[in-house]
Amino acid sequence: ADLSGANLTGAGLGNATLTGAGLGNADLSGANLTGADLFGADLFGADLSNATLNHADLNNATLSSANLYGAFLIGAFLSNANLLGANLSGANLNNATLSNADLSNAVFLAANLSGAFLSNADLLGANLISADLSNADLSNAHLSNADLSGAFLSNANLLGATLSHANLSNATL
C-alpha cells in the first residue's frame, strides 16, 4: 500500500499488517501501531511523534529523518532498520531490539534505551545526551563521535564497542 504523505494522525492501527508499506512523510503522530507489522516499510521523514509502537515489527524498515519524539517503542523490533538522522528524543525504547540498525546521527536526547539490544548497531555521531542505556547490550556497537554526555550506562555491555572520539563526560558507567 502506498500511503506516502497521508494524514493518519491518531489512527488506530494496532496489529495492522503494513509489510513493505509506503508511508514516507506520512503524519502518524499520536497513532496506535501497537503490534503492527511494518517489516520493510518505508517511513522516511514520517511524523511518528507520540505514537505508540510497542512490540511493533519494524525490522528492515526505513525510518531515516523520521520524527519519533516521545514515541513508545517498548519491546519493538528494529533490527537492520535505517534510522539515519531520526529524532527519538524522549522516546521509550525499553527492551527494544535495534541490532545491526543504522542509527548514525540519530538523536536520542533523554531517551529510554534501558535493556535495549543494540549489538552491532551503527551509532556514529549519535546524540545520546542524558539517555538511559542501563542494562543495554551495546556489544560491537559503533559509537565513534557519539555524544553520551550525562548518559546512564550502568550494567551496559560495551564489549567490543568502538568509542573513539565519543563524549562520555558526566556519563554514569
Image: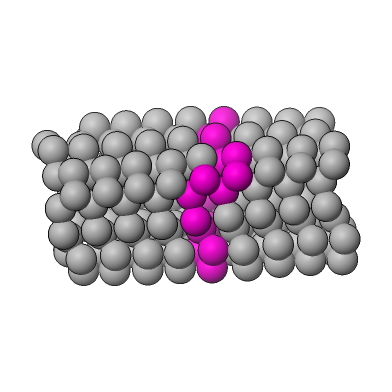
* Foreground of the two, 110 or 39: 110
Q: Is residue 52 visible?
A: no
Which quadrant of the figure has residue 40? top left
Residue under the point 83% across and 52% down: 167
Residue under the point 48% across and 31% down: 80
Residue under the point 34% across and 59% down: 48
Q: How many marks?
A: 0
Image spot of residue 37 (x, y percent): 27, 42
Chief SS of the magenta region: loop
Q: Is residue 97 magenta?
A: yes
Image spot of residue 93 (x, y percent): 52, 57
Give the answer, above or below, for where 88 lies relative to 100.
Answer: below
> In the drawing, does residue 134 fall left or right of residue 169?
left
> In the drawing, does residue 131 fall left or right of residue 18?
right
> In the drawing, does residue 115 fall left or right of residue 28?
right
Highlighted magenta segment, given as a residue range:
85-106
Q: Is residue 141 magenta?
A: no
> In the drawing, does residue 84 fall left or right of residue 123?
left
Q: Quadrant of the C terminus?
A: bottom right
Give the answer, above or below, for where 102 lies relative to 108.
Answer: above
Image spot of residue 114 (x, y percent): 64, 59
* Foreground of the two, 51 or 34: 51
Q: Is residue 120 visible?
A: yes
Residue under the point 71% across and 34% down: 142
Which quadrant of the figure has residue 27? bottom left
